Each structure stands twice: as C-alpha cells, then as structure tokens.
Amino acid sequence: MGFSRRPLTLIQLVAALGIAFNPQFASAYDHPLSDEAVREAYFVGQDVKNVNKFLSQYFRGLPVPQSGPHVSEIELSTPYAQVVEISAQHSVGYSDMRAAEDYRNRGDYMAVRVKVLFTLSYANRANDFWREVSVRLIQKKNHMPATSIDGQSIYSEGGGGTVIGADVFARFSVVGVRSDSLQVEVLPPEGPAVYATFDLHSLR
C-alpha cells in the first residue's frame, strides 16, 4: 500500500507524540517500518522542543578509563531513529512524504557512532587509528559484525588542527536483530572492551 498523502489531524499528531514520549505506550523496535511509523517518526523529528529528549535514549556517555583511549560516547541509531534524526536536521521544507521516500531509498540498517578520544596514555597516534577500533552488536549468543565501518578525525578547537580522536561509524544488517536487550561492543586498539546496553523493548 502506498504512503498516504493525507496530513495528520491534530488528534493523530498528539497521539503519535504521546506514544513516542511515554514509554508505557511506546512500541518496541521493529523493521521494516510501516507507513504510519515513518510518519510518526517524521513528526517526532519536527518537534524541536522534545526531539533531543527522544534521541537521548539512544546515547550513552562513558567514563575515562585508567589507561588506553577513551571510548567516550556510543550512539545507536535504529531505522526509526534515523527517520527522526533526518527530520530534525531538515526543519524547513521537509515533508512526511519526503521522509517516506528517503526511508525507502535508504533501506533498513542499524547504525552505531563511537567517539574515541586520545588520553595521556594513548596520544599522538596516526589520524586513521580508528581503523583499529572494532564494533559489534551482541544479542544473547548472536554476535553481529559490522557490514561497513568508516571514521572521521576530531580536531581540537584552537589547537592548530591537532587531532584529538575520531568518530567511528559502523553499519549493521537488521537481520537477526530482535526486540530485546542489545549490547554494542567496542574493542579499542588498547585496553578492555567497552559495552553499552540498549533495551529494544522500549526503543523504536
């Protein structure tokens, strides 16, 4: 069935946002997204007052380790969260129909962003040190490797272009991912593995 072109009524919009921001009513993670789920995610992204609160559920900040690089942030992005993120980035001239088209063109995948920073015990590394960072998804006994991985250097502010770390971007197939507890495992070049847990029962 094609994507509906009818605009959401005020009642439908309030109901959609109520589901998104009230965990007791929220649906669990699923794929592929229905037309209604894409529309709902689009309007969540357009809600500038609450979108950051919604997306914060997909973010984990981590403490500085005693040694080795600092895996400081792990951010998960499900297909639903991707629609929300892209909608939030296009607050002007972006429609629910365009969001649906973009979703169809993009396809379903899980995305993970990992921020890795240098420390006193792990500094002055090559700009592409991120290639030594391994990222996996773990769900029960199922260990899922990334289908692709990329990185982008992070530079200090006013530091003359000094590299202080990198963002690592990993993509994963949605095949085998269930609506259950999910761990992101990060293996840095040095030091122990770092984990972040996300509950896909309550996340979209």
Image (cartoon, rainbow, N blue to C red):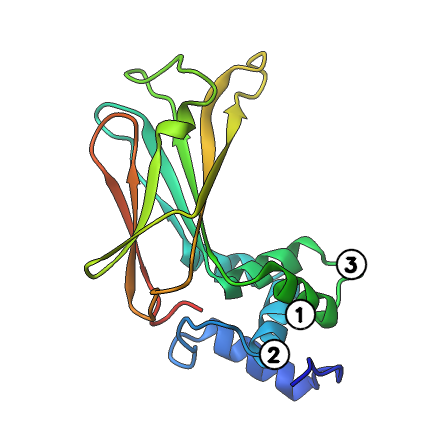
Q: Earlier in the sequence, mark 3 or mark 2?
A: 2
Disc 1 crowd, CA 10 A, few/some/many (<14, 14-19, 20+): many
Disc 3 crowd, CA 10 A, few/some/many (<14, 14-19, 20+): few
Q: Are marks 3 and 2 in contact (CB under 8 Å)?
A: no
Residue at 25 percent across and 30 percent down: it is: 65
Q: Are marks 1 and 2 in contact (CB under 8 Å)?
A: yes
Q: Name the kind of residue labelled 2 in the image.
A: Asp
Can you say whether 20 is above or below 194 in the image? below
Secondary structure under badge 2?
helix
The image quarter containing residue 142 is bottom left
Can you say whether 21 is above or below 161 in the image? below
On the rendered image, what quadrant is the N terminus found in? Answer: bottom right
Secondary structure under badge 1?
helix
Q: Position of residue 141 (x, y in %)?
A: 19, 59
Q: Are marks 1 and 3 in contact (CB under 8 Å)?
A: no
Q: CA distance from mark 1 to mark 3?
A: 16 Å
Q: Position of residue 97 (x, y in %)?
A: 73, 72
Q: CA distance from mark 3 to mark 2?
A: 21 Å
Residue 1's label in the rendered image is: none
Residue under numbered circle 3: 92
Residue under numbered circle 2: 35
The image quarter containing residue 68 is top left
Q: CA distance from mark 1 to mark 2?
A: 7 Å
Residue under numbered circle 1: 100
